[in-house]
Image (cartoon, rainbow, N blue to C red):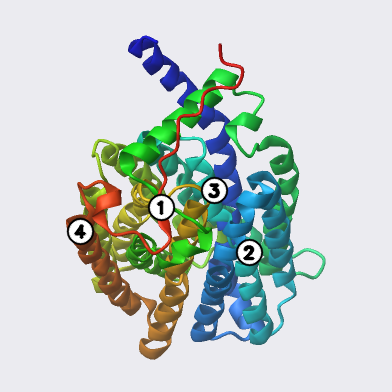
């Protein structure tokens, strides 16, 4: 077949896949991100009503990630067996229900339990989507696809911040604004399970909008990636937990989540210094996430010009550390918000250029488990960030001082990126690190379209 025709068909097919899949999973992750992060706004009323100190709030906010860590690998081990559509539907129903139950919180112990259960319920969704994208997009298209998907992180805050300001002012049927935040946000997640079950398809072969020839092209390109990149697959998916690739990327992802969640959970508290109006609070809180959205778009497209994403990743880690350090140094709330916006620009762009790197090294069910572990281990930072900033806030009287801690952790991401680049960058992944025991090179034969002439 003529190569120019292949190229034109490739663009059209990738555009079609993107239209059918990426916006939908973005909406779902937006809902997920709202449900896990709405606690930052609810704290402004909930803390006084329930009697939560900053340290207790930080602990409860972080316990979400403990549940997430413990159950993410089991969740992604199950997902390929039951299919993404069924598993994502289950996740939506359970996390929505737990979010709604959080409206019943009346003491710190209940708050801790429900936050932990929310992490258990949502575990597997984000890495599940990342793995799901690898079933549809060849390696060369994943940076843009992943970068577009992770826009949901900042879009969630752009949507949530003004709505949260409005919901904080609700006083219906004897319930306070923070009660309504949990009820409404959780209810949306439960309702979203219905279109998920109807719209998503597990693989290209099961999608009615993908032709036989297109499904065959996707399979051949994914097989080519496995050959050319030397991707590895273990005999048993759980053996991925012994892979140096998995542990290396897990440690590298950790600093970014410390920075993101340490920053995002405390933005409303900083912005509160500008105004006592709940509506104004909501709108001002969107500012860092506007810059975060711009960062994701700009950086993911810039990084797609690189054969590998190591240098872009090191640079955005460095920019994140500078922004967080400046946030801690600024005495003026306005200047602190500006520094937080710089930090958000860099921090939120990390995911879009980080995740295509692990998918260069892992494939199949090994990728599902490996990506889940990288994400779950990295998200321990979601516990460390809020808790550390909360403890520093209680000890010093200001959450700004916690920004120095966050900056130091994020700076480790620069060091880690450069170390891994020197070890693995520019090499065939099969030669970069010896596979863990039991791993075999996943060189699959090209799969021809069914009923091909």
Mark 2 and mark 4 lie on one chain; the one further toward the N terminus is 2
Q: Quadrant of residue 220?
A: top left
Residue 395: x %, y % from top left: 38, 90
Write down the residue under mark 4: 423
Give the distance between the C-alpha atoms of the residues marked 1 and 2, in whole angstroms: 54 Å
The residue positioned farthest toward the bottom in the image shown:
395
Mark 3 and mark 4 lie on one chain; the one further toward the N terminus is 3
Write down the residue under mark 1: 440
Write down the residue under mark 2: 168
Residue 399 sits above or below residue 51 on the image: above
Q: Name the foreground residue: 452 vs 400.
A: 452
Residue 366: x %, y % from top left: 48, 54
Give the distance between the C-alpha atoms of the residues marked 2 and 3, in whole angstroms: 32 Å
- Secondary structure at badge 3 equals helix
- Secondary structure at badge 4 equals helix
x 50%, y 83%: residue: 54
The residue positioned farthest toward the left in the image shown:
422
Q: Is residue 272 visible?
A: no
Q: Give the foreground label among 1 and 2.
A: 1
């Amino acid at each position: 077949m003529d190569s120019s025709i292949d190229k034109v068909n490739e663009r059209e097919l990738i555009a079609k896949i993107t239209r059918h899949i990426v916006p939908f999973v973005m909406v779902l992750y937006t809902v997920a991100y709202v449900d896990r992060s709405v606690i930052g706004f609810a704290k402004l009323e909930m803390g006084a009503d329930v009697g939560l100190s900053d340290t207790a709030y930080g602990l409860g906010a972080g316990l979400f990630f403990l549940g997430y860590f413990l159950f993410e690998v089991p969740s992604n081990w199950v997902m390929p067996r039951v299919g993404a559509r069924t598993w994502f539907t289950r996740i939506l129903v359970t996390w929505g229900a737990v979010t709604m139950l959080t409206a019943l919180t009346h003491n710190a112990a209940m708050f801790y339990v429900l936050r932990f259960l929310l992490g258990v319920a949502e575990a597997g969704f984000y890495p599940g989507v990342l793995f799901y994208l690898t079933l549809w997009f060849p390696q060369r298209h994943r940076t843009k696809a992943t970068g577009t998907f992770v826009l949901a992180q900042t879009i969630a805050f752009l949507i949530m911040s003004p709505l949260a300001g409005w919901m904080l002012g609700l006083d219906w049927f004897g319930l306070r604004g923070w009660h309504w935040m949990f009820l409404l946000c959780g209810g949306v997640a439960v309702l979203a399970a219905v279109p998920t079950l109807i719209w998503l398809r597990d693989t290209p072969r099961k999608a009615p909008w993908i032709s036989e020839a297109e499904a065959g092209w996707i399979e051949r390109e994914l097989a080519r990636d496995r050959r050319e990149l030397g991707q590895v697959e273990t005999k048993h998916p759980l053996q991925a937990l012994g892979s140096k690739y998995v542990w290396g990327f897990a440690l590298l992802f950790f600093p970014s989540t410390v920075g993101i969640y340490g920053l995002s959970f405390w933005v409303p508290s900083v912005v509160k210094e500008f105004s006592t109006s709940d509506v104004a609070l909501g709108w001002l809180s969107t500012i860092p996430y506007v810059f975060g959205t711009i960062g994701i778009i700009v950086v993911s497209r810039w990084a797609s010009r690189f054969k590998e994403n190591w240098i872009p990743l090191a640079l955005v880690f460095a920019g994140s550390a500078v922004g967080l350090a400046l946030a801690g140094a600024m005495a003026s709330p306005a200047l602190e918000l500006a520094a937080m916006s710089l930090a958000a620009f860099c921090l939120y762009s990390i995911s879009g250029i980080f995740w295509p790197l692990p998918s260069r090294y892992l494939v199949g069910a090994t990728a599902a488990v490996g990506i889940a572990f990288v994400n779950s281990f990295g998200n321990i930072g979601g516990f460390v960030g809020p808790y550390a900033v909360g403890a520093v806030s209680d000890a010093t009287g200001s959450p700004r001082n916690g920004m120095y801690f966050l900056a130091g952790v994020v700076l480790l991401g620069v060091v880690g990126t450069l170390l891994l680049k020197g070890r693995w960058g520019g090499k065939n992944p099969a030669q970069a690190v010896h596979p863990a025991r039991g791993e075999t090179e996943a060189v699959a034969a090209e799969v021809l379209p069914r009923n091909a002439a």
